[in-house]
Each structure stands twice: as C-alpha cells, then as structure tokens.
Amino acid sequence: MGLTRNSTGRAPADPTISVRRVGEKGKIVAFAGNPNVGKSTLFNGLTGMKQHTGNWPGKTVEIARGYCSTEDCVMTLVDLPGTYSLLAHSREEEVARDFLCSGLADLVVVVCDATCLERNLNLAIQVAEITPNVLLCVNLMDEAARKGIRVCPEVLSRRLGVPVVTTDARKKEDLSALKQAMAGYSGGQVLRVPYAQPLEQAISLVMQMLPSDLPNARWKSRRLLEGEEKTEDPGLQAAVEEGRSLLQSVPEKKRKDLAAEAMVHLAESVCREAVTRTKSGYRDGDRRLDRFFTGRRTGYAAMLLMLGVVFWITIVGANGISDRLSAGFAWLERILRRICVQSGMAPEIRGLLMDGIYRVLTWVVSVMLPPMAIFFPLFTLLEDAGVLPRIAYNLDRPFQCCHACGKQALTMCMGFGCNAAGVSGCRIIDSPRERLLAILTNSFVPCNGRFPALLLLITLFFTGSVTGFPASVLSALLLMTVILLGVGATFLATRLLTVTFLRGVPSSFTLELPPYRKPRIGNVIVRSVVDRTLFVLGRAVVSAAPAGMIIYLLGNYPRQGESLLLQFGRILQPAGAFFGLDGVILLAFLVGLPANEIVIPIVLMAYTQAGSPVSMGDTAQVGQILLQNGWNLERAVCTTLFFLMHWPCATTLLTIRKETGSLKWTGIAALLPTAFGLMSCLLARGILGLIRWLL
C-alpha cells in the first residue's frame, strides 16, 4: 500500500525491536498504559526484573524485555513507555505507538489506574480498536478501596468486549490471576467505537480499499483521513480524498476531534456503569498538600526547606560513616602491604598499587559512598511519595522564562546525586532542543562527589570561627546557598543558550501530578542503593583506578628535587593566580577529571610533596596545610565557586557523548560551566577587592 508516516518535523521512531517467541506455544505480551499506573511494577513482579519505577510520569523511556513462565508456555513480556494516547506527541509515546501498531505482540495488556479509570480508558479504547488481542488490567485496587472507589470488572468486560483482571502491583502474590489470564488468552474482537456519522462514513469508504484482514484498518483509515499517514496507492488516495469531502459538513477545527469525543463519551458511559464511589472528598488530603507544596506563597519555601533538611541529614550522617570506612580501608591496607612485602613484590610496583591505585580507589569509596548512601534514599523517598513532580511544577515558570521545559527541574534534581544520572534522565524531555538544553546545563548543580570538598571549604573558612550556632546547621545553610547559586547559574546558562545556539520557543508542558503515596521503604532502599548508589560508585571506581596510577607517577618521579606534580603546578601558576586560585589547584582539577572527590587530596599531596593523595580526615591539619601555602578567604571563595562550576567529570562527559552522539556538544558541555566558573572567580575577586578598598 505504500503507507508512510508524516513525522511533522521529528525523527520517526524505530518500530523494530528484537523480541521473539520462546517455543511453539510462546507469546509476546506488550504492557501498555498511561504513565504512573504501575505498569513497570507489574512487569517487575511477573519477570523478577528490576526495571526502575517511580511515582512520577516519564520514568520509562526505553523498552524493557523479560520472561514469564507458566505450565503451558513461556511469555516474552515487553514493557512499553507510558503514553496517554496513540496520537504520539513525544519520543516515548512514538516508541509505544509504533510497537503496538506493528502487530508484533500476540497480546496487549493495557494497565489502568483504578482511581482514575475514566481517563485511562481512553488509551485502552484506542488499543482495542486496532487489535483484537487486548486484556485490560485494572491496577491499584487497594488504593481505590481506601478512597472508597469500587470497580466492577464484569461490567467493564461486557461493555468493552475484552477480558478484565484486577490487581495490586505492589503485592506479587496477587499477580497469579493476571498471569493465568495472559497465558490462557485466545483472542477476541476489535472494538468498534460509535463515531459521528460523517466520520464513520469516511472511515468505511477508506476501509474498503484496505486489506480485509488488516486488524487496525479503522486506525489506518483515521490516520489517512487526518493526514498523519500518506499513501502512494492511487485508488486508496482517491478514497481518502472522497472521504475527506464527506467530512466537509463538519467544521475544520472539529474534524480531528470527532474520534476523540467519541472515545471520551464511551469512556464516560462505561465508567458511569462500572465505577461507584462510596466516599466524598477522598482527594481533599491531596489537595491540602498541593496547596502547601505548589502554593504561590509556600511552594518555593517548601522546596528550600526540603532541600535544607536533606543536606543537613546527609552532612550529619556521612561524616561518621566516612571516618569508619577510612579506618577500615587503612587496616586493610596494612594487611595488603604485609602480603606484598612477603611475596617479594618490587618496591616500585608495590608503591604504584598501594600508594597510587589502592589509596585513590579507597579514597573515592570512603568519601563518595556515605553521602550517596544517604542522599539517594532520601531523594527516592521524595520521588516515591510524589513530591518531585510538584518541584517540576513550581520550577516550570522559571524554566519557561528561559525558553526551556519544566521537566528540566526533575533532571536537575537527579544531578544532585550524580550528573551522569541527570544527563541520562534528560530522555524524559520531549523536545530535542529542550533535551539538549538540560544536558548542557546539568553540571551546574553539584553532584555528591563535590559535596565533601565544598563542605570542607565551608567548614574551614566560613563556619569554623562562628560560635553560638550549630556548625552542622550553618554548614547546611551555606551549602544550600552555594547550591542555589548553581541553580541560578543553570537558569542563566539556559537563557544564554536559547538566545544563541539553541533558539526556540518553549514547548507546551503537560505534567500529571501523581497522588501522594506512602513510600515503600524496602523498595526505596533497593532502588537507591543498587540502581543508583552502587551503579554510580562503580563507574567512579573504574575512572579512579587509572587516575590513581597517573597521580602516583606525577608525585613520585621528581625532577631537580621536585615532583612533576608540583612542577606542572608552577607552570599553571600565572593562570591560576589570575582567577584567584593557584597552579596546583588548576592542575588538581585537571588530574582529578575522573572523579571530583580526589581534587583536594591531590592539592594536599602537591603541597606536602607526599607520594600519594593526602586524606582530608583531620580538618585542622588540612586547614593548616592550606594556610601555609597561601590560602586565604579570597582563594577559598574562588575555589568554592570553581568547584561548583567547572567541567564535568569523565563519567558525565562520556554519558553526554553517548546521549548527544556529538563531540561538538560534548565539548560545549565541558566549556560552558568552566567559563561560568572562571567568570565567577573574577567577579568574586573584584567584589572582595572593592570591599577591602572600602574598608
């Protein structure tokens, strides 16, 4: 027939996916549904996989595959990205639509939220119209029961002509009925939606020219009539033109709304019969919380309060854990050194392994792991409770003023844990231009790897002499102030890009605010520790190992009585002094590219002429070393600002390269925060110089 899609300026989604049936009786089962209905949780419960889930839309962007076995067959399960409609408006919706329309699936399980069934049925009706192989899964029945909502599956099945199963995705023992229904499904009939007469006549006319065995003929006919698909078949094109002439009696603005109106009316009619409510005001609690978290007067204050509490808990909790890890690694180092000596290992190799690679690796783990182990669970708790989408809602207006998308707020929050994770999370942004904006500016917010150094500088030069106020609270407030500077720089950099390299008008932003839910503590711990903490830590360790080797060689091979590390620092001294730093600090940032955690240890290593990175465990000793090497308030301010804004770490740069597929944009992502950091240093020097002159 020669059907082609009109991509309307976007790159067409690839409908192909490597899935296959297992055995003669095997089935391919696709899971579809609106965002945030528990689709991925059901998928995980059936397959035993750990597909990441979250209480906000846009979590699943790629297709995931898994297997589920019964006595009769092995089913290949495909978890599709969440979509509200087959009329795709974003990349993830295109992926879901193309797979559903490809005919690869033997069964499509459409997952709906029992608490808002009427809205979810729109997608279910669309899918049932293009394929006879549909099973409706009404999920979150426990949550609906708490809100006094009762759903009758028998009525749904009778009205829609599809089998219906009710589940609670959080309870794996409740999934046996769904599994049996999937395995025993043998096919049904395509749902016929009662369209308005002009549209029905036009569809019938076009369908006569399509193959009689085409399961989605009505869908194809609508797409052809609406111009969303084209054909090279002269006969089919003539039928399309005649069908459009039949629609001339309908106002042009309303033509595309006919099908949508019919589906909405059908969904409303079905829900009036199948859904009963025994409680009134069941959403009053959510609305009261929304008035606090999204109110004009309280929304931003609530965000700052949550941010401050999260950082205070991270600061207080991480210090003790980090000290214990350092002590444990020191004890293990003594044992390993003894083994190396007894094995007759050459001193040069022993020094490279223990003083170089081992110390840098253990330093990264002991400094990076504790804050991540605390921050990521707290972040995931906010996500699971439904608070993060409210932050995106609050920040939508500032980002819109920068001609960007409010979803960038979510990726920016991810960046607090790890900038590489924040860059990967930018896939949830629909517009390619706005996605690129979020990727290029994600490194302006500090990740967990920068927190220890920022806290050390704040403690030594800004809170150490303050009395009468809890040091941890003051450190958290100052750290939050530094982070807010990074957020402000994000807005400024985004606006700068939108008037230069990435001009454009902000796209419309539709965000579903999920219900507030009690976080699942066990699931939060698993997701935050395994999916985020250990994953990020593993990448940092891989990057830190070669860095430890380079640092050891620079610090232990002297020329003319000085280490190469200090000599290179002297070469960079003029540039460093110009920006309020020194050459050693600049060199430490360059050598510390694999991981931000090792920058300060490299600085101390160069100052003390040590053969390996120096620990930051003794704050008083670290402060004394810095003061002896010319550090003052100005250098501390400039170093803090440059720590906040400089080139991303190697892991983040590799992630940017993977996400953009461009060396040019990767280079811009490295140069942009660096330029902001250096300009901030010059501005800080000027302000401090003016203050000294006035005083």
Image (cartoon, grey):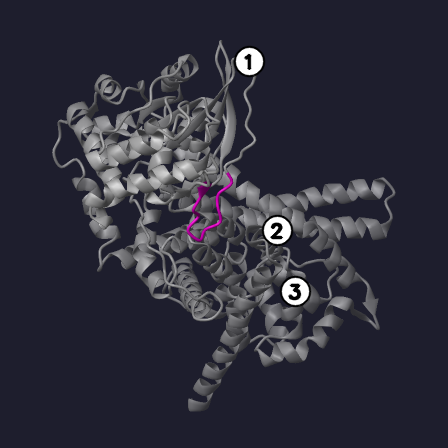
Whether residue 603 is visible here, answered yes or no, is no
Please state if 425 lies on the left or on the right of 165 as rendered. Answer: right
Please report the bounds of the magenta region as a residue range: 4-14
Q: Earlier in the sequence, mark 2 or mark 1?
A: 1
Q: CA distance from mark 1 to mark 3?
A: 58 Å
Find residue 567 and report its horizontal and vertical position in percent: 75, 72
Q: Label 2 sits on what residue type?
A: Val
Residue 250, relative to residue 667: is it above or below? above
Residue 179, relative to residue 624: is it above or below? above
Q: Residue at x 44, y 43 (%)?
A: 5
Query: Does the segment drawn in magenta span residue 5?
Result: yes
Residue 524, relative to residue 22: is it above or below? below
Which residue does the numbered mark 1 point to in the structure image?
24
Which residue does the numbered mark 2 point to in the structure image?
364
Q: Label 3 sits on what residue type?
A: Leu
Callout 3: SS: helix
Callout 1: SS: loop
**Quadrant of the drawing holding the C terminus:** bottom left
Find residue 132 and report its horizontal and vertical position in percent: 36, 22
Whether residue 240 is visible here, answered yes or no, is yes
The disc at residue 590 is 3
Find residue 349 and report its horizontal and vertical position in percent: 83, 50
Q: Residue at x 38, y 29 (%)?
A: 216
* Quadrant in which residue 666 is drawn: bottom right
Q: Earlier in the sequence, mark 3 or mark 2?
A: 2
Tell me the mark number nearer the camera, choosing from 2 and 1: 1
Find residue 332 and report its horizontal and vertical position in percent: 69, 42
